[in-house]
Amino acid sequence: MKLSTILSNDLAIDLGTAYTLVYVKNRDIVLNEPSVVALRKRTQEILAFGNEAKEMVGRTPGEIITVRPLKDGVIADFDLAEQMIRYFIKKSAPSLLPRPRVAICIPSGITEVEKRAVRDAAEHAGAKEVYLILEPMAAAIGLGLPIDQPVGSMVINIGGGTTEIAVISMYGIVNAKSIRIGGDEMNEAIIQYFKKEFNLLIGENTAELLKCEYGSTAPVVARGETTVKGRDLIEGIPKNVTITAVQVQEALSETVNTIVEAVKQCLEATPPELSADILDRGILMSGGVSLLRGLDIRLRQETNLPVIVAEEPKLAVVRGTGMVLENLNIYRKILTHIKHY
């Protein structure tokens, strides 16, 4: 093996609204941390990134705030996003090696301005070359779908900020639907449910924990209950309430309905020949939110199609992006990139 191959620090990045995952060429996934930055409000001094910053969410003094530089799958704060990417690159790749080539996945519904922001942030963070790949394409590659063949493959990738639905054939996206709804909106729906039903304010971390532990959608029969701590919006003092899994399911219903409707719209716009392929091959689901209990069953009932959740759904996109990076000659036709001279 060539020394240059051994020392390669090319990176594939799944720059997610909730989590960022980094794949290093020849080393697999080396980083999986929240896309969060903690900073001092008055001076804008950055105090922490990733896991360390996530631990501060909702628990910091007034002068320290936690910020997520990405919203709905795209960069909302360019400067913080650039510094966060720089931190993750430095943490993932040995600093003495040459500047890395970086492949980053982006939502299929991204605008040219948003695409440029991702490229520029990665370049300013130290990337030698930047390659962009659409999220559903990366997920399809990571799931092992035959994107090079004249058959239709359908993938649904549900992350923190977006839901990406696409039908792929012959290295191209034939039909796609991208909605800026995902795990974040589910967390917010739970927070709003507590405000409305209990006059209780809960934190984002609490809402996320409830979603993961008790979240589901019909037709799953929700069972269980738990005590939740928060602040009474009327009295302004700490208060405990008991919530059931049925109530969490109710809180998530509107968001789930929106995702289901988007999948149906994408299917309705799919050419008949490819629809027949999907009927035979089924729909593959990836992304962390695809683990929501009952979601695959609900989609199966609504579409009358086989629906399969990937074995490691959270890793499909970053693994697919990594496979592209390791086989650029094969996948170059599905990428755009900027090169420094």
Image: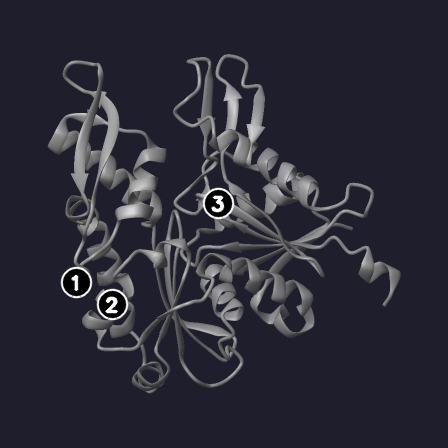
Q: In which quarter of the image is residue 328?
A: bottom right
Which label sits in the foreground, 3 or 1? 1
Work out whether mark 1 precedes mark 2 in sequence or the reverse, and give the earlier one. 1
152 versus 35 height, above or below: below
Residue type, label 1? Pro
Residue indicated by mark 2: 297
171 versus 77 height, above or below: below
| Circles 1, 2 touching at the beta carbon (< 8 Å) | yes
| Circles 3, 1 touching at the beta carbon (< 8 Å) | no
Q: Which residue is drawn at 49% across and 34% down?
A: 36
Which label sits in the foreground, 3 or 2? 2
Residue indicated by mark 3: 19
Residue type, label 2? Ile
Q: In screen coordinates, is 199 left or right of 281?
A: left
Residue indicated by mark 1: 219
Residue type, label 3? Tyr
Nearest the eye: 336 or 206: 206
Quarter of the image with the N terminus in it = bottom right
Q: Which residue is drawn at 30% across and 83% down?
A: 279
Q: Residue at x 44, y 51 (%)?
A: 111
Work out whether mark 3 precedes mark 1 in sequence or the reverse, and give the earlier one. 3
Q: Residue 320 location in percent, x, y?
A: 55, 64
Label 3 vs label 1: CA separation? 29 Å
Q: Residue 75 location in percent, x, y?
A: 48, 41
